[in-house]
Amino acid sequence: MDFRNNFSHTKYTVPLALGLTGLAYPFKTGIDNYKIIYLLVIAVAATIPWDSHLLKNNVWGYPERAVIGLTYWKIPIEELFFFVVQTYITSLVCILMGKSIVPSAYLPTLPITPPSPSIEEAKPKKPKHIIQNDYKTLRRLGLFGAILVIALIAIGSRLTQKGGHGTYMGLILVWAGPIILFLWSLSFQYILSIPRRNVLIPIFLPTLYLWFVDTLALKNGTWVINPEKSFELKLWGYLDIEEAVFFLVTNTLITFGQLAFDHALAVINGFPETFNFEIPSWPSVFLMISGLSLRVKQYPSKRILDLRDAIVKLQHKSRSFSLASSVFEGRLRIDLVLLYAFCRNADDLIDEAETPEEARKALSRLSQAVSNTFGQHQSCEKSMLQSRDSLKAPISMLYDLPEEMAASLETLPVENLPLRPVQGLLEGFEMDLQFPPLEKTNQNAFSTNLSDDKFPIKTERDLERYAYCVAGTVAELLLNLVFHHSPSSDITTKEREDIIQAGVNMGIALQYINISRDIAKDALMGRCYLPTAWLVEYKLTPSMVVQKPDQPEIRVLRKKLLDIAMSLYYENKTMIERLPEHCGARKGIRGAVENYVEIGRVLLEKDGNGEMPIGDQATVSKTRRLWVFVKALCR
């Protein structure tokens, strides 16, 4: 039977045109292009000999009128292009899914106590949920997976040797099985540790799409499978079971390949003490191999666990920065997460103290620990005789600090940060402790016996100083990390200073928005950040704001503060475009800023419509926040 005569006049390019819809995301965005290109080269090189063998042995065929006519090893140029389209689509889905996690946090760890909370599910103080990346458990699962793949290879080999109707299926399993086994052996621990959706969606979403496309192609006779070499079973309609398995297997290959790259980069970026050099924006294959070659027993388990704790803190405390952090890449993203965890833990250390006296003592111990850490690191730089591990000893001696606080200071990248803004941050916490304590009465209500003289924010200058301490310093630290991780940037020292100052101003603006949003929340804590000098104009005092924050005059003052914040935002936003693009710094900072500024816009919108009582906290819906974020990235 000459099955080549059973074709329609449908052009081969129809399913390829449908496949091009997967290229909607602009390649010029630079989203891990090197990983896509590496995999494109490997995929095309590995598929050409196999597909050529199928054509030579009449496993499948195509009509001459359905193709342009250009071939390579008897393979139509359209089919070669399809290899590229499928690899690109699946790689892109895999990379985009991977942006939701910090890969280094999902590396396997050797047993260590206490267990770390799960990044995905755990909340603070609920350690019973842990990432399933225990070394021994992963090895057992990895062995089971390897045996399964070997069994499929054996089945494929048997079908190929037998010939006949199982030939096509056998060739698929014999060709793809060894590659899947190789990738599984390299990265099964990482593949099993990351969220299931990050593995399954890149496999099954493109597979379903390509099943649909292939169904149309087979229906219209764009190509035909030889019934003598196939089982003649249909998954549905015109889709042969072999074609369904082929797309499932190839998308598994592509996904596993991308995850192997992620695994290698997770090791390289996550362990700067082992790979103590600048990671190029286009890592070489040899560098990735060196990352995969590092044994799990050599992984610094405590650093991985501390990084997970930092991510838990980020996800539960800041939706805006958590979303923006997905844009940052490599070591910059890790350092920013660790910086955020330190700042948040320091804030919690003060806010969660039972009495102001305990908070002051804790702040004093933290200040001493910070000074010791930075001071000993500077001594280490001068002598060049010690490793950074020796710098952890002073912190270990200060365990009257909460364990989480001590750990975040231990992992803080002090070698890349100046001390002055860190001290400024602690000064901001000291200003918070200057507010008069708010005591409860027997009726479980707050006492109103507050002295207005004790409120520290008396003038607009005091407010600006406070905003610098608690937010401007964080922006300064963040930008120092950006410039540290972008050493090849052509920005001059003067430009760098201007950009950092603009970042400080932007941090102040965002803190003003934060204060505007939390007037009622702060009042419950006995705090009023609106300057006393502003309140006097409306015959108000800080204690009156604490007692009754929802007053018409306070809404006027909130708008005044928001207007100042928006003015600072517009004055300094252009500096974002002068930031380095390396490691996603410019896009990530732009996204974080725009998300937070959107809170201010919501406040101004609702204030203008009279819809926003002081007691209500402005929130931005997930849809609106995502839309603002996407627009910021596409500029």
Image (cartoon, rainbow, N blue to C red):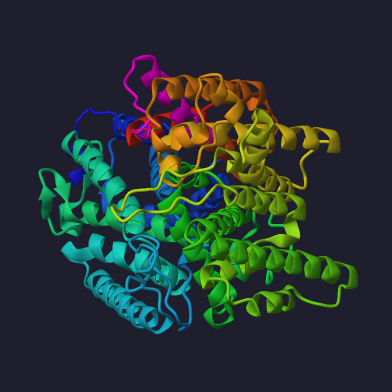
User: Residue placed at 11% from the left, 51% from the top?
Assistant: 234
Q: Is residue 234 left or right of residue 432?
A: left
Position of residue 26 measured from the top left corner of the image (x, y, whole percent): 49, 32
Reply yes or no: does residue 53 show up in magenta. Answer: no
Q: Is residue 13 left or right of residue 325?
A: left
Q: Nearer the viewer, residue 288 or 351?
A: 351
Q: Nearer the viewer, residue 360 or 103?
A: 360
User: Residue placed at 24% from the left, 57% from the top?
Assistant: 245
Which image quadrant for residue 183? bottom left
User: Residue placed at 81% from the left, 77% from the top?
Assistant: 386
Q: Is residue 216 left or right of residue 251?
A: left
Position of residue 603 measured from the top left corner of the image (x, y, whole percent): 42, 25
Q: Nearer the viewer, residue 605 or 72?
A: 605
Residues rendered magenta in the picture: 593-618
Reply yes or no: does residue 601 show up in magenta. Answer: yes
Position of residue 357 measured from the top left corner of the image (x, y, whole percent): 57, 63
> Does residue 178 appear in the picture of this structure?
yes
Name above or below for residue 460 compared with residue 97: above
User: Residue placed at 42% from the left, 77% from the top?
Assistant: 115
